[in-house]
Each structure stands twice: as C-alpha cells, then as structure tokens.
Amino acid sequence: MLKPTPRIAAIVSSAALGLALLAGCSSDNVSCGLDQCTVSIDRETNASASFLGVEAKFISADANTVTLDVAGEQISLTKGQQAVEVAGLQVSLDSVTSDQIGIQVSRN
C-alpha cells in the first residue's frame, strides 16, 4: 500500500480548506467572491448571517443606521459612511429596507 507524500497531503488539505471557506459563504443571504461578500440580513430579532469565518447578528436599524454584532463586537453602520474594521474585515452598509439590511464585507 502506498503512503501519501506530505506534499500530496498538503495539497489535498489546502483544496479542502478552500472549498470549505467558499461553501461557508454560499447561502440564500450571502454571496461571496474570494475576499468579499454581499450579505442580506432580515430586520428581525435573532436574524444573523455567517460569512468569511464570522457571524453577524442584527440588533437594530432605522432609516440610515444599522447596529450589528459582528464576531462578538457591536458596530454601528451608517449608509454612505466608510467601512468599519472588525475581526480583520471591512464592513459597510449597502442598503436598508423595511425587511432587510444589506452589507458589504471584505478582508483587510
């Protein structure tokens, strides 16, 4: 029986990790590229979304400002404001409707 070489094992592990990261960003409310995601979160209690290894939970919103818990840190986002840095990510508010909020997330 042949034993896999360390190089083959590393390639297989890297491929599996890459697929797991991309799979972690594919759901009904999250659309991701390699380093950036567009996320929609319902405006309701306990609504959340997971992306790029973190979870964002909806806290509150008004017409232009949204408060989220991202990776355990509470942040406020205002439409048109520069992105806020949290957990190694840049998070900005894209849209606010009566039903959902939209955010853009990218890696630093």
Image (tube, grey):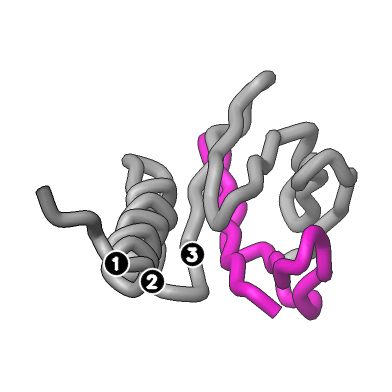
Which range is magenta? Answer: 80-108
* Residue 59 at x, y percent in the picture: 78, 33
Residue beneath the point at 70% across and 65% down? 91
Amino acid type, residue under disc 2 in the picture: Gly
* Residue 16 at x, y percent in the picture: 32, 55
Residue beneath the point at 79% across and 59% down? 87
| Cβ atoms at labels 1 and 2 below 8 Å apart | no
Mark found first going from the N terminus, 1 or 2: 1
Q: What element carries label 1?
A: loop
The answer, for residue 31, to whether it is visible in the render is no
Distance from Cα at disc 1 to Cα at disc 3: 35 Å
Amino acid type, residue under disc 1 in the picture: Thr
- Residue 19, located in which quarter of the rendered image? bottom left
* Residue 49 at x, y percent in the picture: 55, 39
Q: Is residue 66 magenta?
A: no
User: Is disc 2 surrounded by few (<14), some (14 to 19) or many (20+) residues within 10 Å?
Assistant: few
- Residue corresponding to mark 3: 37
Q: What element carries label 2?
A: loop
Distance from Cα at disc 1 to Cα at disc 2: 31 Å
Distance from Cα at disc 2 to Cα at disc 3: 6 Å
- Residue corresponding to mark 2: 33
Q: Is residue 95 magenta?
A: yes
- Residue corresponding to mark 1: 5
Q: In this view, does 100 lie to the left or right of 4?
A: right
Q: What element carries label 3?
A: strand
User: Is disc 3 surrounded by few (<14), some (14 to 19) or many (20+) residues within 10 Å?
Assistant: many
| Cβ atoms at labels 2 and 3 below 8 Å apart | yes
Residue beneath the point at 68% across and 20% down? 45
